[in-house]
Amino acid sequence: MAKKIGELLVEKGAITKEQLEIALKRQSITGEKLGHILVKLGFVDEEKFYKLLAEQFNINKFDKDEFIITKEAQNCLSLKTVVENEIIPLEKKENKLFIGFSNFTILNLIKDFEFESGCKVYPFLMPDNMVKKIIIDFQNFPYGLKDYKYKSLKKYLIEKYNTFDVDLGKVAVLIDELEQNYTQIIFTDGEQPFLKKNSAIFKVDYKLIKHTDILNFIKLYLSEGLRKKLVEDNNIKINLNIYNKTFLCSILKQRGKYNVILSPVSKHIPDIVSYDIEQPLFRDLISMRGGLYLIAAPHGHGKSTFMSSIASHFSKNLNTTIIYIDEFIMYRFESDYSYIMQIELGSDAENLKDALLLDKVINSNIIFIGLLNNLEEFVNILQLAEAGKKVFISLETPDITSAISYINSLIEKTKDYSIRERFANVLRVCLAQRLVNLRNSIKKLYIYEYMRMNLKVKRLIVENAISQINSQVKGSSDYIPLEKKFADLIKEGVLEKDDIFNYSLNYDILKTYINL
């Protein structure tokens, strides 16, 4: 099919034979669709490509940049059918259903769609990025209950600025205004912008980003000092204010090309109550009892958001003083009843040691710490917990035992093993969490395991027998593991067995809860 499309483009004069050869060679290496390569290399305009593609296969081309998909049209096909086949129920007229698609293999399934909908189905070719965006939106939308409205980014830009050729900062802010539940906007040399919503990613309906577009962005929004740092290190990560919207901005330079990654810094912090945490754990987390509270999870599984939710709860319900320290601040707190000092490492303080010294100035009651690198830092934290302060530490580890083992590995670097006993004396709660992808949805389910401190765990820590926590405590009423939670989700039909292999788990323990 790719060769026929290529020959058609050459025949129509859209590309040259030499350009086709270059694209086919690249396709043999990358496996990308030929059309994507031709557009990316600038050999053919995307609009012209889809027009010729529709002509080649005698298919109507859908060319609206603003439209409404009624709930009546949505109800013709189930969300499962729409997601699995990547089709869009565009419009229903009497007994006719017009569907959008970008993958030609669905043309073999038209009879199936007609059987499900009870309508005569007419397919329309749509740009791939438009199909993907609508499907991702549907997965976080009351599908079948409400009309869905679509308008392209280009149309929004033209309405707001009378042109869509604006600086990337304006593009990012407009995307932020229009999109919900996204995690990243990505600008890359030679590509259309990407939008990431949780685990899904799709291209935004906008022009190809030129090298000069990114250079202009860097000149507009980075100081001279930051630009020099970027040139020296080939990467930089900062909080950036763009038209009164704050983003966590990462800029990477690889093989002469730039990638700009913008993550929204939000004022909206989830309510800790929305996590549906068991009451005993909830009481431990929001009490004023001093000591150490460990929050563990792999990268990208919501540790910062969870700790921010706890901090926000204290701010709204208690009159107290809070310090929140992290490498990058993802949320901005409103000081309701409490005073909150947010410290961004590298910006507000050089390192964690310097940040903790600020406690001597404000004498906080509660401290949140987003990272822990070495023994010196841990001893400083330990002293604060021993002074009766409530200290939360975020650790990038997969479970409770590995979180305790990580701290123990720091203690092992010194011969002062009394630190281990001090650690055991102030440890109160360990919690490990996961954000689980749900099928046919961009929403994620929060699950967790936790262990409250008891004499047995304290003895194992003091005796440097951390590994025995798994054999002597894990699986008991004192430590209900993640594996049990995953097994329950499988039994309830929320997850399938194959889904669990996407997560770091102890599969031997899992087998005790479910037959694999």
Image (tube, rainbow, N blue to C red):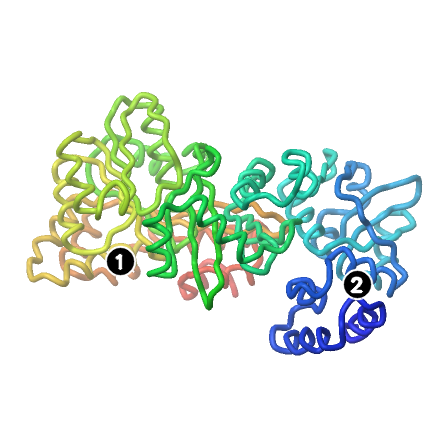
Determine which of the numbered discs, if any, sits on residue 469 in the image.
1
Question: For mark 2, what is the residue?
Answer: 104
Give the residue displayed 32% in from the left and 49% down from the top. 225
* Image quadrant containing the N terminus: bottom right
Give the residue displayed 23% in from the left and 40% down from the top. 391
Using the numbered discs, state the Cα–Cα distance from disc 2 to disc 1 in whole angstroms: 54 Å
Q: Is residue 172 left or right of residue 463?
A: right
Say what amino acid the circle numbered 1 marks. Ile
Q: Is residue 231 left or right of residue 2?
A: left
Q: Nearer the viewer, mark 2 or mark 1?
A: 2
196 or 487, nearer to the observer: 196
Q: Position of residue 276 (x, y in %)?
A: 45, 37
Give the residue displayed 22% in from the left and 33% down from the top. 289
119 or 232, nearer to the observer: 232
Say what amino acid the circle numbered 2 marks. Phe
In which quarter of the view is residue 103 placed? bottom right
Q: Secondary structure at mark 2?
A: helix
Q: Position of residue 182 (x, y in %)?
A: 54, 44
In which quarter of the view is residue 35 placed? bottom right
